[in-house]
């Protein structure tokens, strides 16, 4: 029997997860500030409502996946947030990529209203959500995790309970530390190879046969060579996530060197007006095209 689930934030990932949850037989209520995204939910068979409060009134489990901390606070503890529904025992799954400290603090505020929160950031893009090959990293109580496990597991290739609230966010931040920095490193590799006279075909043939292999190579190198910058994981999101990694490292006394250097290149891409483009656009920073 399906659950009544709320999705707050109907961007590419939120809408795709809503679509997959409905395919699994759940009843889906959703809210987004963009009327077009609400219409898209309705077209998929979901029920758009006028606030996060109303989402919570209709659901036993709510989810949020939003870009900024202030958006999350507005929709959880704000005047039209889920706390205003007054439903003790509600479980809220916060899926956004945020600082661990933010998630811990938010969980405490929700607990004061009788809401049990899990932080469950996602590794993988919306197209991987459509293929159900994303990964959930879930921090929170054992009881809440077991309650939502049957919902999350069918959506992903892996759903891991990482420990208390905040540990999911920590796992996501260090995962992105690798993904974001390796994207910049692969761009360097592609540009140097091209400048030195290697063909794309030669690099595609030789590199995976040596030490350079794996999903990041398979994903990013074709985008670089084809100059395919259609948005998947945006430049601005990579820049934000690297900032979270630097913040986390500093908190624990680690002086990162690689991540800040890579982040400077993504900042140049943002300054060039490419914030919404795919992160692969950083290639053109290495080529100097951001300089006009």
Image (tube, helix red, strand yellow):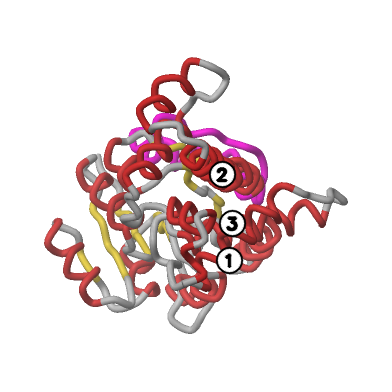
Secondary structure beneath dot 3 equals: helix
Secondary structure beneath dot 1 equals: helix
Judged by depth in the image, the label closer to the viewer, 1 or 3, is 1
Q: Earlier in the sequence, mark 1 or mark 3?
A: 3
Residue 14 drawn above or below residue 110: above
Magenta span: 142-169
Residue 162 belongs to the span the image colors magenta:
yes
Whole-percent x, y for residue 246 in the image: 72, 56
Judged by depth in the image, the label closer to the viewer, 2 or 1, is 2
CB atoms at circles 3 and 2 under 8 Å apart? no
Kindly identify the residue that appears in the image at 56 percent across and 70 percent down: 69
Any mark on residue 267, and which?
A: 1
Bin the neighbour count of mark 3 within 10 Å (Cα to Cα): few under 14, some 14-19, many 20 and up.
Answer: many
Task: State the separation of the CA atoms marked 2 and 1.
Answer: 16 Å
Secondary structure beneath dot 2 equals: helix
Bin the neighbour count of mark 1 within 10 Å (Cα to Cα): few under 14, some 14-19, many 20 and up.
Answer: many
Q: Residue furthest right?
A: 253
Kindly identify the residue that appears in the image at 21 percent across and 73 percent down: 36
Q: Which residue is denoted by mark 2 in the rendering?
A: 188
CB atoms at circles 2 and 1 under 8 Å apart? no
Q: Which residue is denoted by mark 3 in the rendering?
A: 241
Whole-percent x, y for residue 217 in the image: 46, 32
Closest to the observer: 184 or 127?
184
Residue 222 in sight in this render: yes
Q: Earlier in the sequence, mark 3 or mark 2?
A: 2
Bin the neighbour count of mark 2 within 10 Å (Cα to Cα): few under 14, some 14-19, many 20 and up.
Answer: some
Say left or right for 43 vs 211.
left
Residue 89 in sight in this render: no
């Amino acid at each position: 029997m399906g659950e009544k689930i709320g999705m707050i934030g109907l961007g590419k990932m939120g809408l795709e997860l809503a679509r997959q949850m409905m395919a699994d037989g759940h009843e889906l209520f959703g809210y987004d500030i963009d009327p077009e995204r609400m219409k898209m939910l309705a077209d998929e068979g979901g029920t758009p409502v006028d606030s996060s409060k109303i989402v919570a009134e209709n659901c036993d489990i709510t989810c949020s996946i939003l870009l900024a901390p202030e958006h999350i606070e507005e929709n959880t503890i704000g005047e039209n947030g889920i706390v205003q529904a007054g439903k003790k025992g509600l479980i809220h799954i916060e899926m956004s990529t945020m600082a661990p400290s933010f998630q811990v603090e938010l969980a405490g505020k929700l607990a004061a209203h009788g809401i049990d929160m899990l932080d469950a950031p996602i590794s993988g893009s919306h197209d991987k959500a459509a293929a159900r090959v994303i990964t959930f990293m879930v921090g929170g109580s054992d009881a809440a995790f077991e309650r939502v496990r049957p919902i999350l597991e069918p959506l992903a290739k892996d759903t891991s309970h990482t420990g208390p609230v905040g540990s999911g966010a920590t796992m996501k931040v260090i995962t992105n530390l690798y993904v974001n920095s390796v994207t910049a490193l692969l761009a360097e590799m592609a540009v140097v190879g091209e400048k030195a006279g290697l063909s794309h075909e030669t690099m595609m043939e030789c590199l995976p046969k040596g030490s350079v292999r794996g999903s990041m190579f398979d994903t990013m190198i074709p985008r670089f060579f084809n100059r395919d910058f259609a948005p998947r994981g945006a430049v601005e999101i990579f820049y934000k996530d690297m900032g979270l990694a630097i913040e986390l490292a500093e908190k624990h006394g680690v002086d990162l060197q690689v991540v800040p250097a890579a982040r400077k290149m993504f900042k140049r891409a943002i300054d060039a007006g490419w914030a919404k483009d795919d992160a692969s656009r950083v290639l053109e920073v290495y080529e100097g095209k951001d300089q006009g």
